[in-house]
């Protein structure tokens, strides 16, 4: 019985090679794939179809929650708990409530953006199986990598390794 593996990691020399390989990997039907490079490559993200994120909707929901919470708190304080008639103004004087409600909107949206990004990126992540690859430290300097996870439905250890090697990978390694 073989030990369980995380997947296969293919090493490429240039950004053009890794983008072309990523396109072919996606065309071949692999979906649990990740790309690693020393700097952001927009074409790599597009080839692996990473551009769909729920974060904007989360930030919108956080902003709306902040606005409603700010208005609700002011309404509760001015109308329900401590109603004071000062100068004949109404208890719910919404123009005076706009600025604090706006500030609550910004606060909640920003906090949702930060914590949502951390949660969606699974951060902090002090350990990942690709860190075991001998050459993976070069991903922050001058090498480019594509990892196909073993949990991908199309993954077959030998067939996937041969496929990655056929794409021009310098090294294809098993990751535990």
Image (cartoon, grey):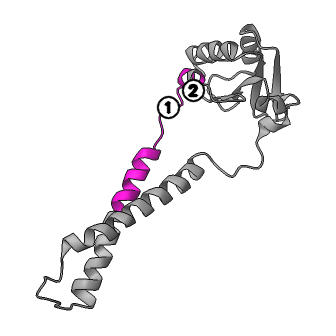
- Indicate the quadrant where residue 101 lies: bottom left
Assign a secondary structure to mark 2. helix
Q: Is residue 153 left or right of residue 150?
A: left
Separation of residues labelled 2 and 1 (CA atoms): 7 Å
- Residue that appears at 79% across and 33% down: 5
Quick one: 103 or 171, which is closer to the camera?
103
Residue matched to label 1: 51
| Relative vertical location of residue 133 with respect to residue 170 in this rendering, above or below | below
Camera-side residue of 98 and 108: 98
* Residue 106 x %, y %: 41, 60
Where residue 47 sits in the image (x, y, percent)? 56, 20
Q: Badges 2 and 1: C-beta atoms under 8 Å apart?
A: yes
The residue that mark 2 highlights is 45
Most common secondary structure along the magenta stretch: helix
As helix, strand or loop, the secondary structure at mark 1 comes to loop
Q: In the rendered image, which quarter contains the N terminus?
A: top right
Residue visible at 74% across and 7% down? 166
Which stretch did the figure color magenta? 44-65
Residue 107: x and y in percent read 44, 63
Single out the residue that lies furthest toward the left.
88
The furthest residue to the front = 87
- Nearest the viewer among 89 and 68 is 89
Q: Is residue 72 left or right of residue 126?
A: left
Relative vertical location of residue 120 with respect to residue 10 in this rendering, above or below: below
Which quadrant does the C terminus fall into? top right
Relative to 104, say whether 34 is above or below.
Answer: above
Residue 152's image quarter?
A: top right
Circle 2 residues within 10 Å: few <14, some 14–19, many ≥20: some
């Amino acid at each position: 019985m073989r030990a369980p593996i995380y997947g296969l990691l293919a090493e490429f020399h240039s950004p053009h090679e890794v983008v072309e390989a990523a396109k072919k990997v996606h065309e071949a039907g692999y979906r649990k794939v990740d790309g690693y490079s020393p700097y952001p490559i927009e074409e790599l993200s597009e080839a692996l179809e990473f551009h769909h994120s729920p974060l904007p909707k989360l930030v919108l929901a956080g902003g709306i929650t902040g606005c409603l919470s700010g208005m609700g708190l002011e309404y509760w304080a001015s109308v329900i708990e401590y109603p004071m008639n000062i100068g004949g103004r109404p208890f719910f004087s919404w123009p005076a409530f706009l600025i604090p409600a706006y500030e609550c909107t910004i606060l909640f949206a920003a906090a949702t953006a930060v914590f949502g990004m951390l949660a969606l990126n699974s951060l902090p992540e002090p350990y990942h199986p690709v860190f075991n690859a001998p050459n993976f430290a070069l991903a922050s300097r001058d090498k480019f990598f594509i990892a196909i996870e073993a949990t991908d439905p199309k993954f077959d250890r030998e067939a996937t390794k041969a496929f990655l090697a056929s794409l021009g990978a310098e090294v294809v390694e098993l990751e535990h």
